[in-house]
Image: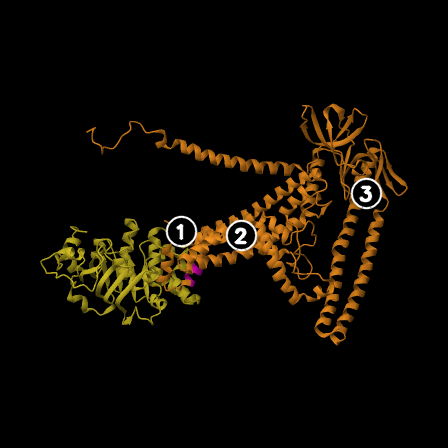
Chain colours: A orange, B yellow
Amino acid sequence: MSSDPLRRRRSTHAALAAHGEAWVWLTGGCLALALAMIIGLLGYIVSEGVATFWPRPIELIELTDGRKVLGEETGRDKAPDGTGRRLVRTANFELTGKHFEWFDDGEVTATTRPAEATVVERLEGGRFQGFPTRLLHGDEVVAAGGEEAWRGFREKHPDIRRRWREAWRIDKGDRGVLQRKLRAARLSVVQAGLSAGADSPAGAAAAAAEKAVAAEVEAQERRLDERTAELRAGNEGWGLEFATASGETVVLPMADIVRAWQPNKASFQERLGVYASRWGEFLGDDPREANSAGGVFPAIWGTIAMTLIMALLVAPFGVLAALYLREYASRGPLTAAVRIAINNLAGVPSIVYGAFGLGFFCYVLGGSIDELFFRPALVADGQPTFGTGGLLWASLTLALLTLPVVIVATEEALSAVPNSMREGSYACGASKWQTIRRIVLPRALPGIMTGLILAMARGAGEVAPLMLVGVKKLALDLPIDGTFPFVHPEREFMHLAYLIYDVGFQSPNSQAAKPMVFTITFLLVAIIALLNVAAIWIRGRLRRRYVSQQF
Amino acid sequence: MSTSPSPADPRQPPPSAGPATDRLAVVAAGGQVEPEVHERVRQTPAVLEIDRFNLWYGTKQALHSITMPIPHGKVTALIGPSGCGKSTLLRSVNRLNDLVPSVRITGEMRLNGDPIYDQRMDVIELRKRMGMVFQRPNPFPMSIYENVVYALRIDGESRRVVLDEVCERSLRGAALWDEVKDRLSESALGLSGGQQQRLCIARAIAAEPEVLLLDEPCSALDPIATGKVEDLIQELRGLYSVLIVTHNMQQASRSSDYTAFMYLGRLIEYGPTTDIFTKPVLRETEAYVTGRFG
């Protein structure tokens, strides 16, 4: 029978390829590589981001040329000739003109960690590093000697800081409210002039109302002035005198000091306190020093607000479009072409969406809204309200950008609804719409949520289009706040992803900003993860309710 | 689905089918045969009249001039080998085949005298007059309660008293009440397969249908669940007019009053169940019900 050409060839042992062992290793290896890269990236971001605010020791470095420098070592590398060198955060910009300095190992004769070395974070001018010598109030010396001065500083500083904060709040918040009130009154005069003529009774009434408002605002301003003057007087004259490592004497006004610590002496608890306080400032305060210090609260707020508004906008559009495409549109070349077009839309560079958003949403839509409803502002101070970048337009632009993701995911979810359910509903006498609303949509909801999760992750990390449609380097007025009408979708806003670009690559003090970039990235990833976890939790609930097991 | 392997043109004159020739062979060759319909079928008034009904999927003819009355208040079983058009016929009764784009029909069906395929017939209203249960249990993704009252809900009924009453009556009618009465608000998807199918029956009878269509209701169930559903069909006997498609000879002989044997889209023999199973007129029918063919 061996001569039979049709006889099936039989191998005596199964080949390696037949077992597929090699493929298991290949597929597993690819997954492992992908995992390693993801974990590596996230781990790097987290470790760098978390460590930024930990107070690290500072060293007194003595150099061969006799100079002494106080600084925190932030980096180390090897010069081409093989000798090591270190990057030291020397601070004291007003004295040296540098924030950081490189020192070759050969130059350094000795390093010590003096206990009283103090790091000061200031409102302006970067860090200051030195040894406290005296606590001054005007001409009077309140405390002399390093230890007494430091103790005195710790005692007085909280009060001074509190007064400074109150004055700052008055300047930022209360005065802003008064200015807005004044502007509204002024605009209603312009409005009355536009609609009825400046000499009409309505115009006169508006002008009279404006006068009254102006008088009231002035009175309130005066009260605020008194209050801030009083607060500032309380802080006036308080200063902490420092001696730098190189011997200069500098007096820092206490009101300018955000916080100070002595890292070489501090106990673990004290360090933890500084760490927590810096995180608190980071999460809850406005940025300082061109965003390279202080907090990112407006950016957190802007990111979350924009992402949620985007999700709210994209969900109905995407779901309705997908519903039509999957349930109503007849299958044919046109539907196929539309589907391909939608898929391709996901591949359009995001900056194109930004340009479209600027051209259409901001200028066309926003411009028309301004013409129709905000003409006084346009006439009076030539200032667009909706006719420029803002939260609403940014959210709409990103909604457009993420629309393909939602449509594709929703279509998948709809086609995964078993036909037997639809037929069962029709057999009960339900119309197509009743079937969709009561059976198909609930059943597809978890899949739709998956699309939304993907869309939110994509949208929250987008930067390029946002630069064109409303994200700004600094925008301290939040888009949602306590002043009427509480939601201000026309306002420009800050965004964490843009902040990464701005702080990392546009900052005048980029070395100091580098750790901030990691922290901001960490925060952005954490926020996206948080939003995702929330959405996944909701999806899990929906799935338990609507999909569940077949028998 | 049920498709005829031979594209037959109904306008062609049918080859003569003498009593001596094998009708099934004639049918397989694409010919026409005269169905053997027993006189006793016509003694009970019909709830549903099927009148020279033809159906095509695209160019393939799936049903060939089916004419049969479905007696009122009785259980009528449709049997026949796979692909003989039983399910297609059932789905034509409530016009579910309308959803398939390529379907074309001629002929007529009448539900209590109302022409089903009339231009003026509202399909939605028509389907509300019927209940249907499918091969696989298809509970909706909602609570047990909402599943049962679904037909009333889509009709806009929202009075709690009415809904409660219908829910209990239907679940009792489907012999499910005692098992689920304490968890009516739980998801119907958590029930076992047999319970889900009885829930579907409860849903089908909730709107007091004029005819109940069962499409192999036990084919996806295990033997115990099958037994329960068969018992239920026994109980529905006399209360509803039931048209049931089944593959299972025992089921047909146990639970139906009338049986129709179909083959390749044609009705072959139709009569009282006892006659079909014990003394069929045609030997082809006998061959099928005794398992020698099919």
Q: Alpha carbon of mark 1 to alpha carbon of mark 2: how far?
A: 35 Å
Q: Could you tell me residue B209's position as x and y percent? A: 32, 66
Queried whether the magenta region covers residue A112, the answer comes back as: no
- Determine whether A192 is above or below B167 in the image: below
Question: Which residue is pictured at 27% across the width and 30% down the height?
Answer: A10
Q: Position of residue A247 (x, y in %)?
A: 84, 31
Q: Circle 2 sits in a helix, a strand or a loop, which is it?
A: helix
Q: Nearer the viewer, residue B131 or B80?
A: B80
CA separation in Å, label 1 and label 3: 68 Å
Rendered image: mark on residue A402: 2
State the SS at label 3.
helix
Name the mark nearer the viewer: 3 or 2: 2
Q: Is residue A337 left or right of residue A19?
A: right
Residue A434 painted magenta: yes
Residue A546 position, x and y percent, is 44, 53
Q: Is residue A69 above or below residue A485?
A: above
Q: CA distance from mark 3 to mark 2?
A: 49 Å
Q: In the image, which residues are magenta?
A: A433-438
Q: Amino acid at mark 1?
A: Gly
Residue at the image position 20 percent from the left and 29 percent from the top: A3
Labelled pair 1, 2 in contact (Cβ < 8 Å): no
- State the predominant SS element of the stretch in magenta: helix
Q: For the residue marked with disc 2, what is the amino acid? A: Thr
User: For mark 1, what is the residue?
Assistant: B190
Q: Which residue is mark 3?
A: A254
Side of A405 where B177 appears, left or right: left
Q: Earlier in the sequence, mark 3 or mark 2?
A: 3
